Image (cartoon, helix red, strand yellow):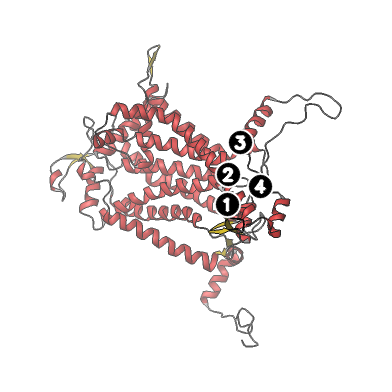
Amino acid sequence: MSSEQTKGGANKSAPIPDNAAVRAADAIDSRLGIYGAAKKNLRKVFPDHWSFMLGEVALYSFIILLLTGVFLTLFFKPSMQEVVYDGSYVPLQGIHMSQAYASTLDISFDIRGGLAMRQIHHWAALIFVSSLFVHMFRIFFTGAFRKPREINWLFGFILLVLAMVNGFTGYSLPDDLLSGTGLRIAEGVVLSIPIVGTYLQFFLFGGEFPGEDIVPRLFTIHVLLVPAIMVGLLTVHLILVFYHKHTQFPGAGKTEKNVVGLPLMPVYMAKAGGFFFIVFGITAALGGMVQINPIWAYGPYNPGQITAGSQPDWYIGFLEGSLRIMPNWEWNIWGHTLSFNVMIPSLIVPGVLFTFMALYPWIEGWITGDKREHHLLDRPRNMPVRTGLGVAWITCYGVLWVAGGNDVIATHFHLSINTITWVARFLFFIAPVLAYMATVRICKGLQRRDRDKVLHGRETGVIKKLPHGEFIEIHEPLDAEMMHTLTAHEQPKPYELDAAEDENGVARKAKPSQKLRAKMSRWYFSEPIEKPTAEEYKELTSGHGHH
């Protein structure tokens, strides 16, 4: 290294170039302050763990959706005006259909690369919603939603709901028989809303179903309204990730006040860029080789027809299942029909499931009374009730999802559809409870196993015979990093009411909400598995805890 260079290798005496590009960059920086912002943020540290890629998959698939969506928008005609098809697909030539359906056929058969773009777009939508779900599960099970990230959890939840809504609107645009069947179900859901249902139906469809306006309106919602809101929410979501700093799993040297990882530039950006092309490549391969939504096989929508075995995209399948297993309950009151058979499964059940999901950070915060900031993640096993509730939610969703295909299951496995429906009805109430109980037991068992590892070390599989004939297994002490992982978590305590009397002997009167909170907290932290005490750990490190 020459004396003119610093330790970083930069030449101190090298003159700063003065050319048009530098002057332009200085002019821009003097107005926008890019240099300072870049210097501060490009070296921001991010932790490294495989589960963090789930959010990246969601981001990259959203980018793919935007890119392919722009292409499709250039050729799609969002009109329900009737035309006679004369395109390349011979079986449908001469058939009356909407311009929307005809233009979708043209994209598939007459636009170079159109079918690939349609299928990449559809696959990216499925990957986007699934990665959002799994990303939120990772956040939920590790406690990454706690203070100060409750609002960011809510933004992520709204993104998930908007993604599902936008997926349904895009699925409905081609105006084929399958998507028309889905719209017919959506119309029935709107009509089931008491008092205002008929007004909403006329407003959305522009008259009696199917009307002339639904496809143009869905097109505006799909390509303009919802994507604009999602881009805004996603931007705010990423800004808050930067502002709050990224959560990290416990480990040696990791605390609530630091972040151990790699800088954004150049390491993280290089890895993220490579991962984007992997996601894009897999999505493109699926779009090119795996057929999805062959609308030409269904034909144009006809209100007098329905597709046998029709199934929506997977993320809407739980709504289909909820409708299929609901008993046929209707009330006629003062000349008005209350369609509980549609309103309960399509509005109330999803409303309860997703409202619980949205409000959970505040529900847990109220039960535990924890007002502190958290930047270290939980291991799911160390919060058994939270993990059990998450698995119960997934089980409930899964039962409804499977029930959405009761007709397909019946025909493929030669079973009674009535039997499948009744089994699904019972499982909807029983399976989540059993899943919760099993998950809590498994988590507590894993905690006991961790405690045993800390106290006695790792099993080696080596059996030793002692002089007096006893056989024992040799245990090895855990390394420092594993020991830290197994012991770093807090030992939570339930919320307790104040003493029955104050210091002056005057009886305290607890509010009903405080009593409920204390009961909920005792349930939430019931049967805790105690971590090894300091004395036990000292005995371990002194060499007396192992065979």
Vertically, is 150 above or below 37?
above
Quarter of the rendering containing residue 312: top left
Q: Earlier in the sequence, mark 3 or mark 2?
A: 2
Residue 334 percent across, percent down from the top left:
40, 11
The disc at residue 531 is 4
- For marks 1 and 4, give the one nearer the viewer: 4
Residue 309 percent across, percent down from the top left:
25, 36
Q: CA distance from mark 3 to mark 1?
A: 29 Å
Mark yes or no: residue 143 visible.
Answer: no
In the rendered image, the quadrant that contains the C terminus is bottom right
- For marks 4 and 3, give the one nearer the viewer: 4
Residue at 48% over, 49% down: 135
Disc 3: which residue: 524
Give the secondary structure at mark 3.
Answer: helix
Disc 3 marks a residue whose amino acid type is Tyr
Q: Earlier in the sequence, mark 3 or mark 1?
A: 1
Q: Nearer the viewer, residue 287 or 380?
A: 380
Give the secondary structure at mark 4.
Answer: loop
Q: CA distance from mark 2 to mark 4?
A: 32 Å
Horizontal side of residue 338 vs 105, given as left or right = right
Horizontal side of residue 153 vs 7, given as left or right = left
Q: Nearer the viewer, residue 222 or 472?
A: 472
- For marks 3 and 2, give the one nearer the viewer: 3
Mark 3 crowd level (few <14, some 14–19, many ≥20, 10 Å Cα): many
Disc 2: which residue: 151
Horizontal side of residue 364 vs 285, given as left or right = right
The disc at residue 240 is 1
